[in-house]
Image (cartoon, rainbow, N blue to C red):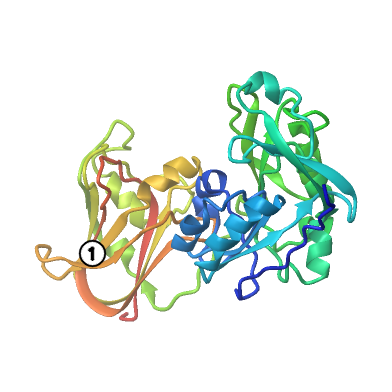
């Protein structure tokens, strides 16, 4: 086999930003990234996630080692103006020759390492081909301009070579701009000579990352989420204009649940306590709602909604379809915003609904989801330029 240096700098004419793409791990941690952020995905395979990340406004690079697979990835990225791709076999050193093994399951289990315990866990998956490659590192690709900007998020799916890739990305890991790392890791290595979860954990904690989530499956591996400190270290200060008139409101909710604090709990949501938990909790029902009666009409500048965030991303995701409506009489409603993604709260990323001075007495929040869900929020602030 001819030795191939897989550093194909195809950027498809896309503006320079980094992108991670691993739909399952990254998209399950949706509340931790924002549209326009930069993500670097290593081990992109055929780019199954390209359309998903386009849909939420993420931009970046997909890195794939196998040239034949990369050619398909390149075609997919070429259809998007937000995604780019780089063909490179990433490791902990530049220019080393490796035999890269190609697996028969659409190359998804391909690795520079022998299968090892993977053969016992997944006996139906075997290597069917191989290719000789030269290794690269993340830091070298950044220093040479192939990866031209710093990533906000990093996903690594490299079948046992996770520690090698991280060891070649120390400058990236040192950057405060990098907020999260999602890495596929095994309690005991699946691949011969591969990294154990404990080794990945030790390395990332040295660079100031903390384990946020890790749910190991039957075979002992998981997609682990590491983040910079996400807990509040100082009071959240969101810049806005006007006076918060929400405490003047009388609040009602669609139902009381077994998790409610009492029949009048809806009033808690406008008291400004901001603790990341829930101020009220409806039943699991279709289109649960919270209504706030401001007692008179106001010109409303902005509405801030703080989600329940301290109990995990799955709980926060329940509010992803939040719909915001206003009314002057409590009967005729004008929908002014429909959320299409999970939002945060005391982490500094509440939902912000601009109202541009729309006049209203009533504000209603409800879930537009097509299946029953409970509604539970931390705090709502309503700003008016009227005193």
Task: Indicate the quadrant containing the C terminus: top left, top right, bottom left or bottom right.
Answer: bottom left
Q: Secondary structure at mark 1?
A: strand
Q: Quadrant of residue 326?
A: bottom left
In screen coordinates, is 303 left or right of 147? Answer: left
**Residue visible at 82% across and 58% down?**
5
Q: Quadrant of residue 291?
A: bottom left
Residue 148 in sight here: yes
- Looking at the picture, tell me which residue is in the foreground, 269 or 69: 69
Q: Quadrant of residue 292?
A: bottom left
- Looking at the picture, tell me which residue is in the foreground, 56 or 86: 86
In screen coordinates, is 303 left or right of 130? Answer: left
Task: Residue 351 in the image: state x and y as whole percent.
Answer: 41, 62
In screen coordinates, is 197 left or right of 144? Answer: left
**Residue visible at 50% across and 68% down?**
238
Task: Spot the residue most to the top.
Answer: 120
Task: Residue 228 in the image: state x and y as whole percent.
Answer: 68, 52
Task: Spot the residue most to the front.
Answer: 1
Task: Residue 64 in the image: state x and y as whole percent.
Answer: 68, 53
- 140 versus 314 height, above or below: below
**Residue visible at 20% across and 45% down?**
254
Task: Residue 280 in the image: state x and y as whole percent.
Answer: 33, 44
Residue 297 in sight here: no
- Looking at the picture, tell me which residue is in the foreground, 87 or 131: 131
The residue carrying mark 1 is 325
**Residue visible at 58% across and 31% down?**
215
- 213 versus 237 height, above or below: above
């Amino acid at each position: 086999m001819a030795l191939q240096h897989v550093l194909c700098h195809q950027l498809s004419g896309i503006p320079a930003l980094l992108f991670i793409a691993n739909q399952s791990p990254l998209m399950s941690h949706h509340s931790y990234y924002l549209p326009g952020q930069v993500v670097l995905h290593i081990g992109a395979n055929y780019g199954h996630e390209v359309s998903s990340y386009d849909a939420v406004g993420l931009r970046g690079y997909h890195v794939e080692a196998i040239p034949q697979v990369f050619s398909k990835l390149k075609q997919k990225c070429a259809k998007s103006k937000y995604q780019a791709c780089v063909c490179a076999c990433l490791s902990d050193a530049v220019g080393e020759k490796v035999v890269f093994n190609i697996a028969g399951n659409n190359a998804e289990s391909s690795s520079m390492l022998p299968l090892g315990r993977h053969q016992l866990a997944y006996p139906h998956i075997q290597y069917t081909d191989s290719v000789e490659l030269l290794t690269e590192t993340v830091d070298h690709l950044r220093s040479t301009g192939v990866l031209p900007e710093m990533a906000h998020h990093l996903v690594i799916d490299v079948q046992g070579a996770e520690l090698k890739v991280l060891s070649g990305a120390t400058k990236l890991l040192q950057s405060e701009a990098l907020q999260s790392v999602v890495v596929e890791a095994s309690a005991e290595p699946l691949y011969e000579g591969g990294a154990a979860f404990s080794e990945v954990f030790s390395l990332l904690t040295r660079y100031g990352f903390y384990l946020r989530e890790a749910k190991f499956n039957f075979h002992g591996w998981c997609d682990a989420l590491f983040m910079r400190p996400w807990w509040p270290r100082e009071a959240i200060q969101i810049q806005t204009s006007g006076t918060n008139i929400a405490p003047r409101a009388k609040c009602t909710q669609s139902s009381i649940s077994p998790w409610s604090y009492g029949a009048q709990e809806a009033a808690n949501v406008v008291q400004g306590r901001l603790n990341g938990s829930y101020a009220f909790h409806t039943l699991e029902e279709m289109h649960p709602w919270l209504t706030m009666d401001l007692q008179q009409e106001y010109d409303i500048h902005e509405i801030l909604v703080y989600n329940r965030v301290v109990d995990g991303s799955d709980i926060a995701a329940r509010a992803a379809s939040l719909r915001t409506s206003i009314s002057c009489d409590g009967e005729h409603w004008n929908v002014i915003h429909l959320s299409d993604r999970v939002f945060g709260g005391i982490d500094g990323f509440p939902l912000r609904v601009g109202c541009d001075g729309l006049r209203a007495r009533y504000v209603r929040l409800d879930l537009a989801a097509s299946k029953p869900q409970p509604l539970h929020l931390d705090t709502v602030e309503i700003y008016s330029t009227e005193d």
